Amino acid sequence: MELYPINLKLTGRRCAVVGGGAVAERKVMTLIATGAEVSVFSPVLTPGLTSLAEARRLTWMSRVYAPGDLYNFFLVFCATDQVDINRQAAVEARAAGALVNSADAPELSDFYVPAHITHGDLLITVSTGGGSPALARRLKEDIAARYGPEYGHYLTLIAKLRPEMKDRLATAKEREKFWRETIDHEALHLLKSGKFSEAEERIRHAACCTGPKS
């Protein structure tokens, strides 16, 4: 396995995107959602990126990328429609110590962005190592059809109840049995139907059946 799976915390991290088109916009939107500090190098922007720049949610360098621009960034995305510029930017960014993703030069990329599904704090990713984005999208669609928003609601609920259940259940064995049994079709069906209080009560009932702390 050549790729190391990891989820990065980017809040407050400086990230650069070279390019201002549709591909660049997708990269920027994801970065902003994580709380990253984003700089975009491009003479023109999509309407979506323009709105973000006007709202000061990103820093726009309204010119073509130039050598020397990419120092002191943690991540750099090379996403222009010009292969030579992407390659030059990728080489410079890597030399400066940044992790690089280049849209058209996998051999110069340090990482690939997986297809992903998010439901609240639940994050499910699919990666083909850059080998087939189409396959990654297809798998994402299949997984999304199987694991809907109710799984995100479930995660929120058990995160809320976890400290309480840790106090009520005495042993690691009891806690393992409890969490395994609460992931059932009935609880998920209740959440899918928007019956959050009923789902929470069902999980609390499972704790009582597992056995109180002695």
Image (cartoon, rainbow, N blue to C red):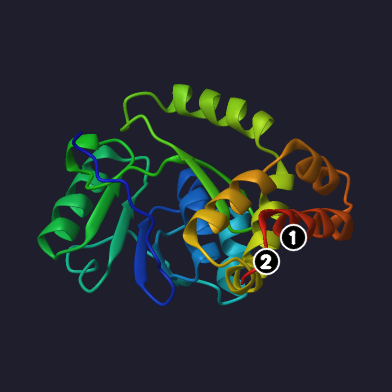
- Asked if residue 16 is positioned above or below residue 22 in the image, the reply reads below
Please tell me which residue lies in front, 121 or 41: 121
Residue at position x 37%, y 46% from top?
Answer: 80
Please tell me which residue lies in front, 209 or 181: 209
Residue at position x 80%, y 59% from top?
Answer: 200
Element under disc 1: helix
Element under disc 2: loop
The image quadrant that residue 161 belongs to is bottom right
User: Alpha-carbon neighbours of circle 1 within 10 Å: few (<14), some, or many (≥20)?
Assistant: some
The residue lying furthest to the left in this view is 95
Q: Are marks 2 and 1 in contact (CB under 8 Å)?
A: yes
Q: Position of residue 16 (x, y in %)?
A: 35, 63
The image quadrant that residue 74 belongs to is bottom left
Left or right position of 14 against 100 = right
Q: Position of residue 1 (x, y in %)?
A: 20, 33
Q: Can residue 45 be seen?
A: no
Residue at position x 29%, y 48% from top?
Answer: 101
**Residue 173: assigned label:** none
- Quadrant housing the C terminus: bottom right
Residue bearing mark 2: 212
Q: Amino acid at mark 2?
A: Pro
Q: Can residue 169 be seen?
A: yes
- Label 2 – label 1 distance at C-alpha: 6 Å
- Asked if residue 110 is positioned above or below residue 127 in the image, the reply reads below
Residue bearing mark 1: 208
- Asked if residue 124 is positioned above or below residue 37 in the image, the reply reads above
Q: Position of residue 55 (x, y in %)?
A: 62, 75
The residue lying furthest to the front in this view is 214
Residue at position x 66%, y 60% from top?
Answer: 158
Q: Amino acid at mark 1?
A: Cys
